[in-house]
Image: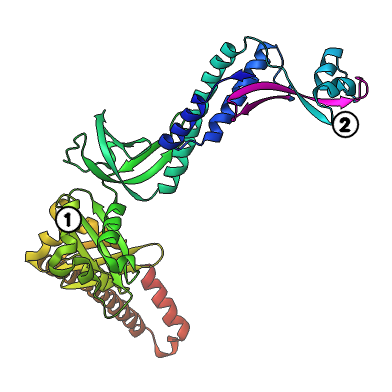
Amino acid sequence: MIKIGTALFEACEELERERGISKEVLIDSLCDAMVAAYKRHMHLGREVENIDAILDEQTGEIGVFMTKLVVKKIEQDSEEELTQEQLESRQITLKDAKEIAEDVEVGDEIKIEVTPEQFGRIAAQSAKQVITQRIREAERNLVLQEFIDKKGTLTTGIIQRVENRNVIVNIGKTDAIMPQREQIPGEIYKPGNRIRVFVLNVKETTRLPQVIVSHGHAEIVRELFELEVPEIEDGIVEIKSISREAGFRTKIAVWSNDPEVDSVGACIGPRGSRIQTIVSELKNEKIDIVRYSEDPVEYIVNALSPARVVSVDILADDEYSKEAMVVVPDDQLSLAIGREGQNVRLAHKLIGWKIDIKSVSQMEKVEAANIQQNYAEDEIVDGEDLIQESETEEISGEIAEEMSQLDEEDITVDSVEEAAEEIAEE
């Protein structure tokens, strides 16, 4: 046995407190390292399975043991052909076993210590490598399990540094990466500042898992409303949809399951206290709270707020397409569309409808143009009817003239038809 003392156990307990790696994992790693070192030292193959390492926590000693089967006589007992050396490594006679333990019988298994002399240095080197590797694997599994459970949730971290436009955020046991596409445009990320982020994804790698977080995700808004509005947390008010352009503007559609509770008022809070807290957290990002409705016309009108709407015409509403024409007052057109189309774009994302917006004057011009086009088409149709009518009268006159040159006896049904055919051919 090799004396290792109590320092190892103290180190194991410290690692368990600091990193959450259990003491048993480290002890098992040490035993595995001892077995691997012994097999290399004795030139044994990995397939040899009757070698174990046992650590006595009471004495602080560790040793390598070989498990052997107690037999009357060492001999071949299977189809596998073994050398004498291999047989002796697996079997032991009852006489020799009694010298180790008096109460053994044939068929029992007995563990025999085989720790080589001066094995401590070799074992220590091997143990260091194996334990280091096991600690990394244990940390990796702990981080992976923790953040897989946190995927799709909000967490708080501390900004560490900015590398190649990526922001590195410490979120506990690991550093997460916030890519540029997940950052808020114009936001300055200073190391040391606390930041609330959304865990987007966890990628398994050969080292520690790579955690991807976002500061511009729409779900951050949902989490903030759930934290600040008790009615949402209780399920009285429900968030139906969110559309966000991080750093600029957000639209959120809410619905109340209780007729006596105003969904919009609950989100705003007394004197705007709740919404102001959320706006402050989002660095003064503008938030439009929209009242959800199952009526698409009402929902579209609400989604385009604060612009006033004159009328909504549903152009298509099926599984393939949802499209509406919205008419607004002339002075509301720019407000309805928004800066660079932001308002109508967010409304489209919020409700999932394609929205075409026109002012009253634009709509009047379109209607006037349609009326003029329809009038022109009617004139063309009337002209064609007049031409056809004049041609018919001309043919009828020619037939009458032909008939007048015939005697009454010659006028028959066949003669009339022949005259008409001749005129038609001419």
Residue 185 lies, in percent from the top left, at 19, 42
Residue 307 shows in this picture:
no
Residue 261 against residue 102 in the figure, above or below: below
The kind of residue tagged 1 is Val
According to the picture, the residue beneath numbered tag 1 turns out to be: 279
- Residue reaching furthest to the top: 118
Residue 399 shows in this picture:
yes
Judge whether residue 52 is colored magenta: yes
Secondary structure of residue under mark 2: loop
Looking at the rendering, which quadrant does residue 309 occupy? bottom left
Residue 75 lies, in percent from the top left, at 92, 20
Q: CA distance from mark 1 to mark 2?
A: 77 Å
* Left or right of 295 in this view: 21: right
The kind of residue tagged 2 is Gly
Out of 289 and 87, give the one closest to the viewer: 87
Q: How is the image coloured?
A: rainbow
According to the picture, the residue beneath numbered tag 2 turns out to be: 107
Which is the main secondary structure of the residues drawn in magenta? strand
Callout 2: few (<14), some (14-19), or many (20+) C-alpha neighbours within 10 Å?
few
Residue 262 lies, in percent from the top left, at 23, 75
- Magenta residues span 51-77
Residue 260 against residue 368 in the figure, above or below: below
Judge whether residue 70 is colored magenta: yes
Residue sitting at x 51%, y 37%: 22
Residue 19 lies, in percent from the top left, at 42, 35
Out of 408 and 35, give the one closest to the viewer: 35
Q: Quadrant of the C terminus?
A: bottom left
